[in-house]
Amino acid sequence: MIFEVFRQEREGQPFQHGGSLEAPDLAFAEAYAREFYGRRDESFALWIVPREAVDEVREPYVAEVFDRDYRRVDGYSLKVKLKEARERAGTAEAG
Amino acid sequence: MNAQELLRLADDELILGWRNSEWTGIAPFLEEDVAFSSIAQTEIGHARAWYELAAEELGTDADALALDRDPAEYESAPLVELRLVPDWARTIARHWLYETADAVRIEALKGSDDADVASLAEKIDREETYHRMHAQMWADRLRDEPRFEDAVDELWPYAAAMLPPTQRSTLADRVGKEVPSNKVLLSHERGQSGDGLRVLWEEMTMVRRSVPGAKW
């Protein structure tokens, strides 16, 4: 059986995928996960999940067809806008 | 604690670490390869720590004790000297018996009057917890496997003879066996290293002997 291992580096942080391993059952998976991700104090907690329990979704995304950058946090760069505004006003900083 | 007793602990851990490391690259599957190699490495780390204590008493250093003695001077138990590759059932039987016996020994050492010994035993026990979990999980899985049961029966007298006489009945209770007769125990006691240890010693000390006195 394949198991996916997620690790939480510090208490309260989100779990992140660490890797996967093969083991005959959950007890072995736990021992190997501790060995690979836990015993050197590199994780606060581990999630060990049988791969078949993971529901993977790929297809149904709708690609963005309209320019709606402004809805996204990274869609509006203040730095660029500010630079353009300064140039228009003729107050661009030297250098 | 006297140097000979410390050397017994150190030699057991060093030789078992070597024997377990013979599985590196050829264990039954990759995950187990990593886990068992890591166990081998920590055993050798524990050996170093015991050698350092013995070295203070003997006025030498850990490397000299581990690698410059003659094979006949090693204090290791015959249990750890057996070469068991490529027999995984016997390897796990030894692993389980050794870790169970070592737990009995470490519990006693944690209560030692010698503060250095007690605190080192405490530290080592924290890592041995992982070894015991690993050994127990395999023993549970192979419990009804005839090859494993036969291997435990074969190796049990070695495991009993590894411990001081006062600790043997505790071990027998934990593994569900009877303490073997004195006659059987005598033939499995320390100090009867065979050719197996010499072959291992040749390999283990080869590089060190190639340039005597070198600082690495």
Image (cartoon, coloured by chain):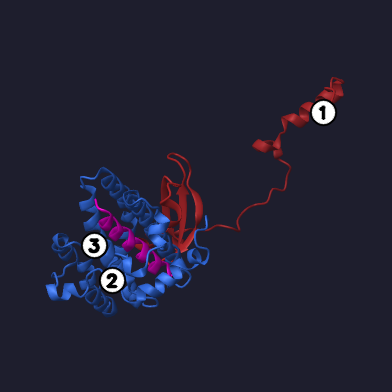
Left or right of B7, for residue A59: right
Label 1: few (<14), some or many (≥20) within 10 Å? few
Tell if the residue under mark 3 belongs to the same chain as the one under mark 1: no
Chain in red (letter): A
Quarter of the figure with the N terminus of chain A: bottom left
Q: Is residue A23 magenta?
A: no
Residue A84, which numbered label? 1
Q: Amino acid at mark 1?
A: Glu
Label 2: few (<14), some or many (≥20) within 10 Å? many
Q: Amino acid at mark 2?
A: Pro
Residue position for label 3? B101
Report in which chain the residue with disc 2 lies: B
Tell if the residue under mark 2 belongs to the same chain as the one under mark 3: yes
Image: magenta residue range = B1-23
Q: Secondary structure at mark 3?
A: helix
Report in which chain the residue with disc 3 lies: B
| Earlier residue among tags 2 and 3 | 2
Q: CA distance from mark 2 to mark 3?
A: 14 Å
Q: Nearer the viewer, residue B39 or B109?
A: B109
Q: CA distance from mark 2 to mark 1?
A: 81 Å
Residue appearing at x 14%, y 60% in the figure? B166
Q: Secondary structure at mark 2?
A: helix
Q: Is residue B11 magenta?
A: yes
Question: Can you tell which of label 2 and label 1 is closer to the viewer?
Answer: 2
Question: Can you tell which of label 3 and label 1 is closer to the viewer?
Answer: 3
Residue B78, which numbered label? 2
Residue appearing at x 50%, y 62% in the figure? B212
Residue A63 visible at all: yes
- Quadrant in the rendering for residue B186: bottom left
Q: Colour of chain B?
A: blue
Spot occupied by residue B175 in the image (x, y as percentages of width and height):
19, 66
Quarter of the figure with the C terminus of chain A: top right
